[in-house]
């Protein structure tokens, strides 16, 4: 996290966080968006099994084609 600019480095997101980011949030790179991503990821993991989250990710992930 870059405190001065209010942004963070790319990488380190869990699959659940990537599902949330790709499905619900804007692509901006701010601490606020990362916090929303983290909170929504926790909530998603409370109501959906990891296997189902993985299926969502695999069905939506870009494969460069």
Image: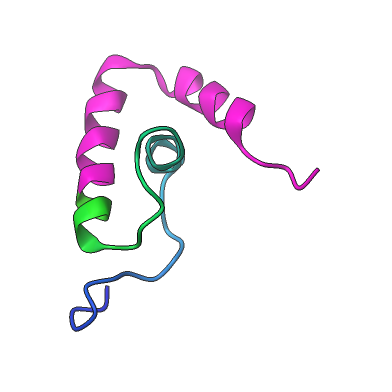
- The part of the image, by quadrant, that contains residue 60 is top right
In which quadrant of the rendered image does the N terminus lie? bottom left
The main secondary structure of the magenta stretch is helix
What residue do we see at 44% from left, 42% from top?
Answer: 18
Q: Is residue 19 above or below residue 3?
A: above
Residue 13 image position (x, y, % from top left): 41, 52
Q: Residue furthest bottom?
A: 4
What residue do we see at 29% from left, 25% from top?
Answer: 44
Going by the image, does 9 lie left or right of 1?
A: right
Q: Is residue 19 above or below residue 6?
A: above
Residue 61 image position (x, y, % from top left): 61, 37
Q: Nearer the viewer, residue 49 or 27?
A: 27
- The part of the image, by quadrant, that contains residue 40 is top left
Q: Nearer the viewer, residue 27 or 14?
A: 27
- In reply to whether residue 46 is colored magenta, the answer given is yes
Question: What's drawn in magenta, residue-wise?
Answer: 36-65
């Amino acid at each position: 996290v870059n405190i001065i600019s209010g942004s963070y480095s790319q990488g380190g997101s869990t699959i659940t966080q990537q599902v949330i980011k790709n499905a619900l949030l804007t692509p901006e790179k701010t601490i606020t968006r990362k916090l929303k991503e983290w909170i929504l990821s926790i909530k998603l993991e409370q109501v959906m099994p990891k296997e189902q989250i993985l299926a969502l990710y695999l069905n939506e992930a870009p494969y460069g084609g």
